[in-house]
């Protein structure tokens, strides 16, 4: 397996914080998501690389092992998987020790001097390697057997999902294609509940990474991004819209047709002498609450006066007369 620099893939420094790694991942995942790049195989490959990098760097234990083992990370992962399935012993040739003898059924003996020569004693390199590589595995340098790995819960995964505001209002479904720990792809149908917001995390229990031993599988978290809407702006569970109204309706009163995310139209009564910029509240016409879909926010409609253009001679005369009557 080819070594991949996960820090370079996410565009962060090796000393990046968890928050910096998460922000970099979300930005790239949003840019490279298949929904935004249909048919783009290069973007799809990068999207998978970004998810692979985040899976490792977002897990403190995996990141520690990745940092300690560097380019031998893939060899270690193969060894760890073989340990949980009764596979072949780890091949020490990945660390420059010449491999194990043919037919060997146990680890090759590795001396402390060899390990110190490879990892060094300064800056905790030697001790960091021991803590990272052998922690909890029941094996130490120079031994010829190892204990069964500990049972451990599987890794949680995150999957970015982009939805429209209509889908956030009504709820939706997605068919996701994810990768298993052995590199195989799987299709998973998930439900996105009404009321999701930008940044919402929806938990899909048991659909993360497999556990080791008797450990339970991890969970899958859908990280929601809501696309901007042409008419509505969202503020928590409330919606805001600015709609054009002709001058005569504002002056004399009338009705205004207001669109909704349900796909229907509401009739808003405009009182006579309504001022430009006045805001009307339509109770219960906003977004459903994610925690309680029966509860809805409000819709606030701001009216914007539209002045007439291409006036006829008669219209100009009438407006001039109005100006005289108003003392203008």
Image (cartoon, rainbow, N blue to C red):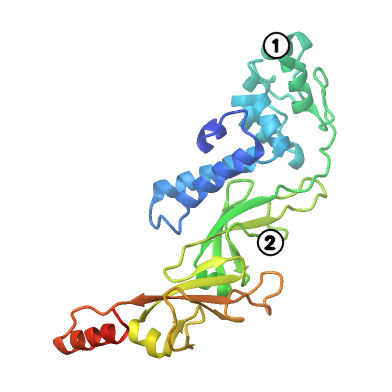
Q: Position of residue 58 (x, y in %)?
A: 66, 41
Q: Residue at x 59, y 71 (%)?
A: 238
Question: In what element is the residue under mark 1?
Answer: loop
Q: Is residue 105 visible?
A: no
Closer to us: 73 or 226: 226
Q: How many marks?
A: 2
Q: Which corner quadrant of the image does residue 80 belong to?
A: top right
Seen from this angle, which residue lies furthest left? 313
Seen from this angle, which residue lies furthest front? 327
Q: Is residue 272 above or below residue 121?
A: below
Q: Is residue 225 above or below residue 50?
A: below
Q: Residue at x 59, y 25 (%)?
A: 71
The residue that mark 1 highlights is 120
Q: Residue at x 66, y 56 (%)?
A: 220
Closer to us: 178 or 60: 60
Residue 170, numbered label: none
Residue 132 lies left or right of residue 230; in this view the side is right
The residue that mark 2 highlights is 204
């Amino acid at each position: 397996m080819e070594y991949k620099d996960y820090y370079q893939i996410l565009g962060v420094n090796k000393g990046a914080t968890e928050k910096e790694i998460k922000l970099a991942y979300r930005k790239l995942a949003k840019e490279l998501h298949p929904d935004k790049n249909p048919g783009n195989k290069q973007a799809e490959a990068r999207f998978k690389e970004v998810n692979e990098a985040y899976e490792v760097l977002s897990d403190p234990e995996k990141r520690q092992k990745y940092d300690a083992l560097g380019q031998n990370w893939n060899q270690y992962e193969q060894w760890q998987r073989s340990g949980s399935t009764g596979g072949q012993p780890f091949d020490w040739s990945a660390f420059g020790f010449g491999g194990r003898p043919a037919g060997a059924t146990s680890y090759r003996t590795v001396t402390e001097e060899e390990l110190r020569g490879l990892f060094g004693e300064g800056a905790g390199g030697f001790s960091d390697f021991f803590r990272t590589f052998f922690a909890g595995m029941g094996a130490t340098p120079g031994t010829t057997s190892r204990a069964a790995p500990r049972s451990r819960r599987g890794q949680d995964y995150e999957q970015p999902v982009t939805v429209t505001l209509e889908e956030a209002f009504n709820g939706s479904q997605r068919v996701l294609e994810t990768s298993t720990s052995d590199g195989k792809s799987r299709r998973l149908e998930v439900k996105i509940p009404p009321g999701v917001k930008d940044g919402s995390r929806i938990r899909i229990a048991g659909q993360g990474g497999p556990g080791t031993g008797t450990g339970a599988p991890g969970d899958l978290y859908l990280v929601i991004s809501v696309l901007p809407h042409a008419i509505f702006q969202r503020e928590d569970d409330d919606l805001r819209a600015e709609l054009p109204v002709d001058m005569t309706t504002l002056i004399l009163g009338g009705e205004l047709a207001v669109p909704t995310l349900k796909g229907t139209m509401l009739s808003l009564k405009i009182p006579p002498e309504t001022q430009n910029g006045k805001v009307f509240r339509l109770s219960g016409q906003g977004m459903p609450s994610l925690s309680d879909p029966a509860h809805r926010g409000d819709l606030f409609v701001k009216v914007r006066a539209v002045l007439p253009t291409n006036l006829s001679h008669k219209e100009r005369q009438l407006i001039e007369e109005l100006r005289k009557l108003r003392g203008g």
